[in-house]
Every structure is written in C-alpha cells, then in structure tokens.
Image (cartoon, coloured by chain):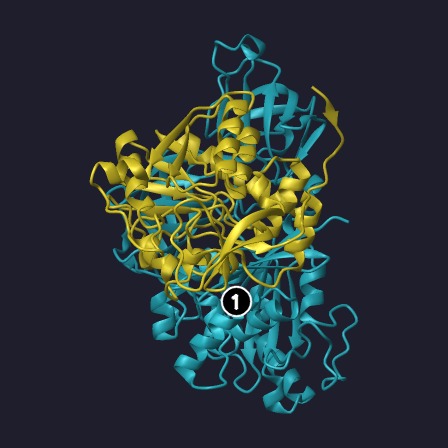
Chain colours: A yellow, B cyan
Amino acid sequence: MTVVAHPQLSHLRALESEAIHVMREVAAEFERPVLLFSGGKDSIVLLRLAEKAFRPARFPFPLMHVDTGHNFPEVIEFRDRRVAELGERLIVASVQDSIDAGRVVEEQGPRASRNQLQTVTLLDAIAEHGFDAAFGGARRDEERARAKERMFSFRDDFGQWDPKSQRPELWNLYNGRIKKGENVRVFPISNWTELDVWEYIDQEELEVPSIYFAHVREVFRRDGMLYAWREGTELIDGEEVLSETVRYRTVGDMSCTGGVVSQAATLAEVVTEIAATRITERGETRADDRVTEAAMEDRKKAGYF
Amino acid sequence: MTLDLLRLSTAGSVDDGKSTLIGRLLYDSKQIFEDQLESVTQASERRGGEGSLDLALLTDGLRAEREQGITIDVAYRYFATPRRRFIIADCPGHRQYTRNMVTGASTADLAVVLLDARRGVLEQSKRHAFISALLGIPKLVVAVNKMDLVEHSQARFEEVVAEFEGFANILRRDGRRAGHQYEIIYIPISALNGDNVVEPSERMGWYDDPAHPTLLDILEQVDVAYDHPHDRPARFPVQWVIRPASDDPASRDYRSYAGQLASGALRRGDEVAVLPGGERTRIAAIDSYEGELEEAVAPMSVAIRLEDELDVSRGELICHPARAPLIARELAADVCWMADRPMRAGGRYLLKQTTRTVTAIVDQIEDLLDVRTLERDPPPAELALNDIGRVRLRTSAPLVFDPYKSNRRTGSFILIDEASNGTVGAGMISDVP
C-alpha cells in the first residue's frame, strides 16, 4: 500500500467520516441491512463510502434496486457495470412484478407514473428478504420534510414514518433497536448538499451515468419541465417532441424526472453549474414533489424511501 | 483553499426573529433557491394575505408546523461561504420541546441565542443559554435582535448586555471545558433589515468590534472543536472488526479495527492500551481507503491494525496508556429525560455510550436542575419529560469514559427503554464521581 501524507480534514472529509461512522454502526447493530442503489449520484456516493467503511472485506450487506421498469437505459447499463466492478450482490425488486402479482394497479393516462407504486415494491422486498435496515441516499437539503428526518429514520411494520414521534438523535449515538417487522431507513449523507455530492464525485473521480452530462435528447415540455420522450409516451394536446441539449440533475423514473437545458459536458462544468444554480434539484426536475406542498411528507408517511 | 465545517445551533423564543435571521443568513449568502422562495411566497400569501413573506415557512418543514405556525422539530439547514460550510440545527423555542433543543445542541460547536432588544433577557433565552452551556457548546453568540425597533440605540444594547452579564458567570462556570475557552460574544443586529448579519450596519456606527464586525464574520472565524487534535488525549472506540472472508487469499490474514477517532491523534508505532481489559500493544498500521496513514486525527474514520494478536471487539477503546480515560461501573451524570413515562430510582434501561451498549440501573436521583437559574434543587421523586437532573447509575459491565466536560464524545450516553425501544434519556457524565 502507498503511504499518504497527513490529510487535510476538509469539510468533505468530515462529512465522509460521519457517513462512514453511520454505515459501520448499522453493520454492527443490525442483522440484515441492505443498501438501496438506484444508479443515481447519491447512491453512487454511498457505494464509495461503503468501500471506505468495509474494504478490504466484502460489504456486510447486499445492494437492492427498486426498478420501476421506466428507467433510463444508460442508468441500468451503468448500474450493472458498477455492481460487477465491486463484486457485490444486487437484488432487483421490480414494480412490474408487483403489478403482475396484483399488488398494485398501474396508473393510466398521459400523466401515469410508477413513482407511488415503488413504495409497495420496496416494502414487499424488505419483508421478503427480512431486511431490518435500508441505506438510502436522501439528503436533508433536498426537501423540507427531509430536513426534519433523522439519520436513522424509524419505520413501523407498515413502513410508515411518523414525523411527530421521531427518536431524539444526540451526539453520534444512534439507537437502532427495533422489533420484528419494523425497519430503519438510514441516510448516511443526510448532512450533504447537492454541491457536496458533486464535489465528492469529482474528488473521488467516480463514474456517473452519462445522462448527468449534457446530451441531445428527444424531449417534450410539460408543466414547465422537459421530459424524455420514448416509444409509447402519451402526449397531451399541444405538446410536441423536440430535440434539446439537456442533462439530468436527478435520476428517477423517466415518467417523472425532468431534464434541464445545459451545456455542462464534464464533471468540472457540472460542479460549476450546480454551484451557480438558483433552483433546487427536486424543484427543477421532479414532478413527484410538485403534487402538493407536503407531497414528500405524505409519501414518506406511507413508507416511501 | 480548505473549507471547514461549523455546526451551530440556534434557539430563540417564538417571536424574537430566529426564523427571520436564518432566512436572512440563507438569503444573503444566496442559499435560498428560487423555487423555495416561490413556494414560501405562495404559502405566506395564502396565510397572511398579499405581499407577506414569512421566512419561517422556509424552515418549518412539516404540515402540522405550517398549519399551526409553530416549529415542532429540529430542522437542519445548510449554507456555505467561501470560507466555511455551515450546518444549522434550528431548534424549536417552545418549552415543551426542550428535548429537541438538547438534541440540536449536542453536535454544535457554537450556539446563537437571540434576544429581542425591546424585551431583553426572557426566561426562555436564559434556558437556551444554560442548555447550550450544559451541552458543552464552547461558544455562545448573544445576538440582540430587532435593533431597528429601539432606534439602533447603543444605550439599549448595553442595557441588554448588562442584564445578560448578570448571570453569565454561571454560564462561564458551567461552560468551561478542557481544551476550549468558553466565550460569550455580544452583537447588535436587525435580522429584518440585515444589519450586522452579513454586512456591517451603517445605522450602528457605534458598534465597531474589529474582531466581530458581523454575525457572519463570527461564524466564519471561531475555532471549531477539532481544531487542535494534538492537544487532546486519543480516544478510539472500536466499532467494527474488518476481516475479509477466508476464501480471499490476498487478505486472508488481514484483521483491522474500524472506528472514528472521538478525540486526539494516533500514529503508526504508538504504544496503545485496549480498554477496559488493559492489554498493551503497538499500532502496526493505520489503514484508509487511500492507503496507509502515518497519523489519524479526530474526527477521521479509519481502521487500525495492531502488532499483537489480541481479542479486540466492538465496544472496546484504544488509547495511549499514559493518558487513559476512566473505567467504572458506577457513575453520576446529568440526564435530560425525554419520555412521557418518568424516570424513577430502580428503573432499568439500556445505556449506549461510544460503541458500547450495557444495562444500567438507576440507583438514585440526586437533584433536579432548574434550567431557569442553573440552581440544583432537592431531589424529586422522579424525572419527568424535559427535566434535567443528576442521577447515579450502575451498569452491568464497565464503561470506559471521560467526564463530559473533558470529552463530549466519550462522556455522553443515551438511555433506551427496552420495552418500547425509544430513546428516553440523554446523559452527560459528571466530573465528580
């Protein structure tokens, strides 16, 4: 191994250390944790943190992707490649399977999305595999309900979050005790901002799916956002497919994730763009948060990530 | 350029403009995004009529909070300047939410207590200041707000400062910490207009403290807890043993102890003791993902290999033998009670301290702390929700600890109710046994 000089403890290193501490606490105190990996930037950071927490050993947990079936193909290709590189095990929990099994009913119409349906698939997979802790890449700067959520977010047998009776979280002492059937969602990068995530990706030279960089894509404009057009997309009157240079700030279901017009084609350009942006990532690109003032809070209460 | 990280907590009464101040800091440092501002503007107008902008709605994230116009829970806010990154734990000011204030204060390096220049020091402001001192926050900024409503009067500012100084000696006594200088900084501001928040005030030319021209300057310049790791004793609680599967020939014999340095520094080759057992060995290597390190300092997360094959497991602590912490099964601590069901003598709880969880029995409740005066009252029969009192505990196995006054990481613990699994108490180990 190489010997490195005394490292500067930058704010990124401090945040990294906090996150590694959280991951090791979970590994030590839970029997069956899982790490939710979507192929998005936040969960890409989680994978690097897991490497830092547990290498040279294997991760003491599998990875799991809740697959809506409406993914960007570039992201799925990246997901599988990254998992293979790491040599870790990936479980895919599929919303399509939930639909086929009659657990959920597909929404209809041009605005149909599988975003809500993911919750059932996630909860079913947690129950099926007996997971007692699930790492997620959520951050408190993303959304105001999340700003109030603990690092260890306790969920009852129904997967529900009760914001009014959260366990107090003091110092770096996390209470991971649960009963059978309950689980904890753990957010090691709670204290990171979107800019921190990009600076970290830059610092660690992490690969991200190509859709995060500017590329030409067939899109259509709806509610002020640019959605990816693909075979089978139902357009509403007046909408037309156009060709735009866009990039994505978040990776979600294709049906509810908008792109932004951008020329940022490299990591450095993305970092510069994020540092200058005046709009939050979820406000700019996520239809799922725009439903009501408390859309995220309501979904979390129902068991969402 | 190296950015560093300051964690601060804010507390204030309902009307003293805390949310406005946070809104101001975020807004003036360009951390409020357009869509957030738009959604806050819409919500303000829906509730307060055309043209109103309630920056509190920016921090109040839950439906019930917006509906009732109160803050229920700690909210975390983030902003950055070219000099530093900040994490604000924004704590509710209501009395019934003391436990949230304790929570927000537990990780903070600095506390901002807001006073209303017209009303001076309220009971609640004192309680906030006391709790921040009790929780070991080394720096207290007393921001005298709403100076615009007292005609930016220097005389009024000095009156409020004098009133606060009337009990500041108690804060200095309780806030004193090994390795830190406790400091109280006063500053007159108007959060509404932005005076002395990010920009120096032209209306308060009489205030020209060169060390602290604005609130943001203070936040950018104060020392943080981890600034001087080499002066502090090394504390490395073992979290996790890294041992690759035996089918991997490259690392078959690898074994390291992973954890986060709670304080101090460890170097390769250092002689160390593993507590509570007391075995001695040397550090063979300090591993990180980037490679071996000569030295690790708090708060880094690393993995340590030892020269001798010892049986070390989670919950044990690695330190230098000459600067060892205390080991005991009986201890006294200030406990903040956080559950509806009160704590009584004879109660049994799980106690988690560093990476160690043991069973604890309450032998005795020794006194009740009056958080309005910091006087210690005669022992009550029980500690109720939001009470803080000194408690004597016995544990099922030895704890390795420092008094909270010398080390916030190794001197703190939480109590967990075994039946409900709830976190019911927060403890700070006393320096007198």
Number of labelled discs?
1
Residue A138 in the image: above or below residue A210: below
Q: Is residue B165 left or right of residue A135?
A: right
Q: Quadrant of residue A146?
A: bottom left
Residue drawn where x is 36% and y is 49% of the image: A115
Name the residue located 22 percent from the left edge and 41 percent from the top edge: A103
Compared to residue B338, the image places residue B193 above or below, namely below
Residue B301: give x, y in percent of width and height. Answer: 58, 35
Asked whether the viewer can see residue B278, the reply is no
**Residue positioned 35% across, 42% down in the render:** A184
Q: Determine crowd level at label 1: few under 14, some 14-19, many 20+ residues with C-alpha closer than 10 A.
A: some
How far across and how far down the image is residue B267, in percent? 69, 28
Task: Look at mark 1 in the image and give the residue it sits on.
Answer: B35
Q: Residue furthest bottom?
A: B151
Q: Quadrant of the N terminus of chain A?
A: top right
Q: Is residue B26 left or right of residue B385?
A: right
Task: Report the residue at 74% width, 48% height from top.
Answer: B2
**B356 relative to B285 in the view: left or right:** left
Q: Chain of mark 1?
A: B
